[in-house]
Image (cartoon, rainbow, N blue to C red):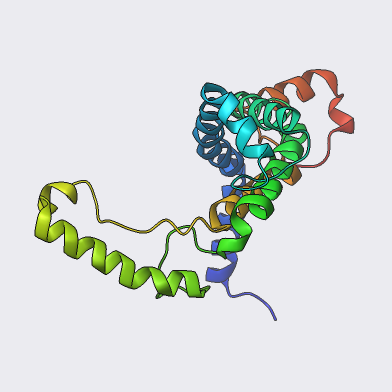
Amino acid sequence: MLLTPYAQRFHHGLNHSRQLDFLGPLAMRLYLVPIFWMAGMNKLDGFDDVVEWFGNHEWGLGLPFPALMAWLATWTELLGAICLLLGVAVRYISIPLMATMLVAAVSVHWQNGWQAIADPNGIFVNQQVLDSTDKLAMAKQLLQEYGNYEWLTSSGNFVILNNGIEFSITYFVMLLMLFFTGAGRYVSLDYWVAKKLIPAQNLPPK
């Protein structure tokens, strides 16, 4: 079926927008930078506690080699944040970052289901989320009765953290995109290094 002239113009305009295709990878990189930097710094600041949490079988994760695992997780996140910011070795650093997100999803968040924030109206609702409704209502009632509720909620509504896999899987998907697309053109060291080192005739088509 032939496109109408208006549809052809619209399609042609969409093709021209590919000149800005570097904005997608750039946006994902900059979005992930503070997430991994803060996660890594929090682990570094409380490294001994993280090691204990990683290794404890009763109230922690019960992971093998907890000191090594904590060290790898901490420096993967810190180095990952730097690489994402500069756009250097983005496809390479995406691999250990994705592994970190999968380990977090399985070992920390899996038992809580999908939702990061408990929302009984969401699609992926489990019993834990449903039970949180009454608990949140009771907490609000107590705060309204015994606390300065308007002041306490002036920065936002109270919610219950369900701590599901939602955030870790979202970050995994973003990293997966970066693994396939790379850091993007122009605003990344990867692009300029490749431009200098790889002859133009060997570059993949844009």
Residue 33 screen position, x and y as percent: 54, 32
Reply above or below: 176 against 74. Answer: below
Relative height, residue 185 to residue 88 (above, below):
below
Instruction: Name which quarter of the figure residue 36 lies in.
Output: top right
Q: In which quarter of the image is the C terminus?
A: top right
x and y percentages locating residue 151 in the rendered image: 12, 47
Give the residue furthest to the front.
58
Question: In this rendering, would 160 be left or right of 3?
Answer: left
Query: Horizontally, is 27 left or right of 186 in the view?
Result: left
Residue 177 can be seen, yes or no: no
- For the residue pair 69 and 85, the one nearer the viewer reads as 69
Q: Can residue 160 be seen in this view?
A: yes
At x 21%, y 62%, the residue is 140
Seen from the viewer's position, the closer of residues 176 and 185 is 176
Residue at x 67% of width, y 22% of height: 189
Number of numbered discs present?
A: 0
Quadrant location of residue 183? top right
Coordinates of residue 63 in the picture (x, y in percent): 73, 42
Query: Farthest right residue?
Result: 202
Q: Residue 43: name its quadrant.
A: top right
Going 61% across and 62% down the picture, which residue do you hit? 111
User: Quick one: 175 or 111, which is closer to the camera?
Assistant: 111
Q: Residue furthest bottom?
A: 1
Image quadrant holding the N terminus, namely bottom right
**Residue 33 appears left or right of 152:** right
> Which residue corresponds to the image point at 75% horizontal and 46% vertical from the top-left?
180
Q: In this view, does 107 lie above or below 65?
A: below
61 versus 89 height, above or below: below
Percent x, y of residue 7: 56, 70
